[in-house]
Amino acid sequence: MTKINKVSEVDLDNKDILVTGEQRLEFLKLHNKLRDMVQYIDECRDITVNHLTVLDELTHLLHSSLHFVPQKDKEGDKPAFWQDYVLESDELAWKKAY
């Protein structure tokens, strides 16, 4: 496998997010797994526990690489993980105190 040192820029919310070559390869790997899962689920009308693991990996890679964060909980200074994530710069975004 060829080592990729280039960095791609993604413009989100008027801020550039750098995506490394390593991250792009990870996105590609998970993209292909996701395609396989969709095909399997469509053909078999079934899902496996491994599919859930891949979905969890993809979700983590997306929010950590593209700076998606949970919203602030309306009842206190804590993250509302059950709500939709937002861009890190959004006024609804939960900010870590440390």
Image (spheres, rainbow, N blue to C red):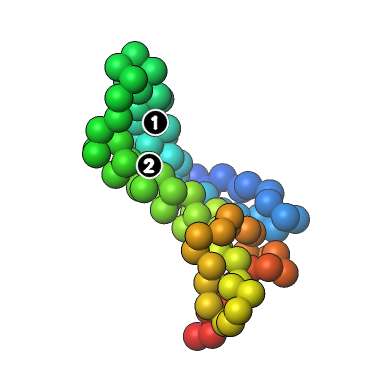
- Label ID, residue 71: none
Residue occupying image coordinates x 34% and y 14%: 43
Report whether residue 29 is seen: yes
Decide if residue 3 is on the left or right side of residue 50.
right
Q: Earlier in the sequence, mark 1 or mark 2?
A: 1
Decide if residue 42 is on the left or right side of residue 98.
left
- Do labels 1 and 2 touch, CB within 8 Å? yes
Amino acid type at circle 1 is Leu
Residue occupying image coordinates x 60% and y 66%: 71
Residue 59's spot in the image, x, y percent? Answer: 44, 48
Determine whether the residue tagged by mark 2 lies in a helix, strand or loop: helix
Q: Judge whether 56 appears above or below 90 on screen.
A: above
Q: Which residue is mark 1?
A: 34
Residue 60's spot in the image, x, y percent? Answer: 41, 53
Residue occupying image coordinates x 60% and y 72%: 72
Amino acid type at circle 2 is Leu
Farthest residue toward the right? Answer: 14
Q: Which residue is mark 2?
A: 55
Instruction: Give neighbour class at mark 1: few <14, some 14-19, many 20+ (Cα, 10 Å).
Output: some
Gap between marks 1 and 2, in whole Å?
Answer: 8 Å
